[in-house]
Image: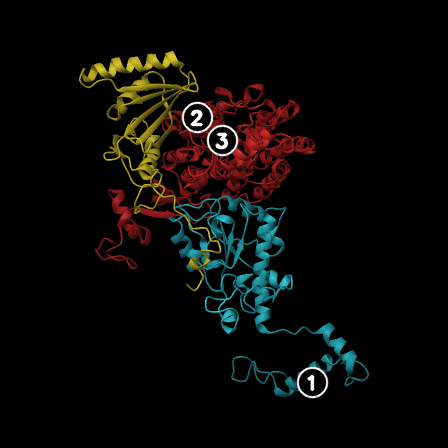
Amino acid sequence: MSPTGQATPGTSPSMSDYRRREQSITLSSVEEQLDQASTEELLTLNFGPHHPATHGVLRLLVTLQGEIVREIKPIIGYVHTGIEKTAEDKAYWKVIPVIERMDYLSYYFNAYAYCGAVETLLEVEVPKRAQYLRVIHMELNRIMSHLVWLGTSALDLGAISMFWYCFREREKILDLFEMSSGQRMHTRYFQVGGVIEDIPSGFAHKLNGLLEEMPSRIDQYGALLNSNEIVLQRLRGICPLDAQTLLSLGVTGPLLRAAGNPWDLRKADPYCSYEDFDFKIPVGTVGDNYDRYACRLAEMYESVKIVQQALDGLPEGPHITEDRKVALPPRHELATSMEALIHHFKLVTEGFRVPPGEVYFPIESPRGELGCFVRSDGSSKPARVHMRDPSFVNLQSFSHMAKGAYIADLIATLAMLDPILGGIDR
Amino acid sequence: MPDATGLELIAQELRRTEGAEEGASAGSPVIETLFFRGRGTLLVEPGRIRAVLAHLRSRGYAFMSSLHGVDHHPHEPRLGVVYELLDMQRVDRITVKLALASDAPEVDSVTDEWPTADHQEREVYDMFGVVFRGHPDLRRILMPEDYEGHPQRRDFPIGGEPVIFTYNERQSLGSAE
Amino acid sequence: MKRELLGPPGTGLGGRVDPDVLRVRNLNARQLLRGGDLEGPNPSAHLEGADFERHVEESVMTTTLEKAVAWARSNSFFPATFGLACCAIEMMSIVAARVDVARFGFEAFRASPRQADLLILSGRVSIKMAPIVRRIYDQMLEPKWAISMGACCSSTGVFNNYALVPADKFMPIDVHVPGCPPRPEALMHGVLKLRKMVQDDPDMGWRERYDARGTEEVIPTVGGLGGVDAFQEPAAVSVPPEGDTAGA
């Protein structure tokens, strides 16, 4: 309702308050709700959900005083897919493609968090080769996620040609994913117990080629942006947030590392053979937008190092656990062994059963701590799958970061926050 | 992770400190301890969750990783809330669980002590219907605000479009029937 | 030759060309069309028969206004930036250098729906987002087209649950592109198929491509076996009438 008491056009009295607010053009009811002392100075602006700069369907209610942001309220749920509910309806094996589509830029991480949780419940051992292959694919995915972040963030800031450079490298990484699993995105490569297939011949050669040229490419990105006057003006000293506030808000990942806290699960609580690799954790000092940008850029170099070490040290062995009750037997065995046939049949129709229990399995995704909580009740379908998504928790820090900044800084901060709405909304 | 004995020590401390404060009639806040797959879990009484979390914070678990809900349908009390805590100094994780009956699913909000719980409690409210008393802004976060029902509960139907085969093709959209 | 303009511009006579001059121009044009050479020794000579046909084919393009407009429209789609979920990343890939949508003229992604004419719905449409998508589609000006990219908006894809709506339920879609997510080449194929649709190119659907018209199975209705009714009311296997590509 507008302040004069007349109904806003297009609404009917029987409509709920929420619908009326959604259809209102003036957002005047929202201003009243936000309870500002002097409403004549403040303008409430609706950003999105359809907006080129919001990195997905994020809706922001921004209260502005002139160009300065006074308050931000993020409204999410516009791409809520009910992934967790769908996962309860499928066998454990079939949940993997569903759960991969959550945080859609880091699909290997989603799959690994879930597979790791189920492997913990099953107490199944993942062979060393499978762990190294997982690390290779996860770190390639980290590089790819940072490339997309860099391309789209630079696009938001106005450095439009960065988009094409970053996506050029991304295509090469996606070629590698296509070589190993047949799909560019959402590859269903990680399975419970290992990976679905060993890497084909030629993969190592192509990967080596990519790793040789990747550091020079990242140098080129740095050369374009690091000392660029516009980038410095828009990112240096803008919207800093100290590590203590970030920790209380539950923020992890490059945002926390930019603020100076070197918390990285790969080093602090190593999983999946990360302790075998030698890499550094880039840490910022001030915690402003420039540090967030620099941290992610430096992480790309480190990921290249990890992949190189994993590829050089790739051990021989099976690519998935030998436990036939969990992993499908190789196809040639089906012709000769009756047990293999029975196992195959059981796994494909009903799936394996997981002993009852609950487990929370956290890993380090490109955006922070990605945790998967799986509760099983002894049947072949999970009773609850919850993904603790880093972007969902990091979004709470956005209003703290952007208070008192200009609108342009708001856009830059949102870009540096790297939210992925698929993960936020699930 | 606190190993099994460490977990029992923590539980004993909680029983001693928190139970003693409230008086003997209130009983211990810890109902049960579980040690499963190397991770310790405390099952606590819903009314004492703030005190338990504050005690754990004083013991070093100062980072709340995750706050999420579970539905234990058909076991009563069916609605559970799980708090995952992390001690960054000693790289230690501990889980705190509570269970609420579905006819009175209310629990105190911990948002003022742990600001990370803000959106996460809203999500538990949206998906399970658990009301967090004292939450600054308890509205639906993922579903539209006027949605009815709590989707993640086990007895909520999964919904969706029926798959069209030839036998039910006539009821599909685009057909004359 | 008389002065071309009857009067200076601004008067009632200006801007109009002298009718005699117009007539001379018309005759010259006709000479040119017939293959005559205006400057040559015999300006009124013209070609006959086969030579004339060849000359016309080489130098004149005939079309209708509709076709010309359709050709222009189809080669300059302005897609609206509408990325919802994972398919949006593959949609960004078609703008990138490997599958370059700028080759076809579609690189001008417009942020405002008022300036766009193609809505590429890329990603899952949740029930909270559906009214907003509809409002964006309504804000677009005619002529407008919509491509539903990916399995999630065409049907509900992988997630057949309470939270998603297939896009067909609330807005008209012209082309569905399957895939999860569709490869950039697949999306490009979908966009080019839309381009053919807009150009009224009849190469649509498998029945034309495989010359399969007349091979459909007609199952008789409840009333009788064969007869007139069977052809007028097809049952389980629907046979679309000629020219209707909805069943393709």
Instruction: Name the residue rendered at 22%, 57% in the picture.
Output: A6
> Residue B38 location, x and y as percent?
43, 18
- The image's colour scheme reads by chain
Q: Which residue is mark 3?
A: A352
Q: Which residue is mark 2?
A: A355
> Residue B15 location, x and y as percent?
26, 15
Q: Nearer the viewer, residue C160 or A302?
A: C160
> Residue A331 location, x and y as percent?
63, 34
Q: Amino acid at mark 1?
A: Leu
Q: Which residue is mark 1?
A: C27
Q: Nearer the viewer, residue A3 or C236?
A: C236
Q: Which chain is yellow?
A: B
Q: Chain of mark 3?
A: A
Residues at circles 3 and 1 in contact by the CB criterion of under 8 Å: no
Q: Which chain is cyan?
A: C
Task: Report the Cα–Cα distance between label 2 and label 1.
Answer: 94 Å
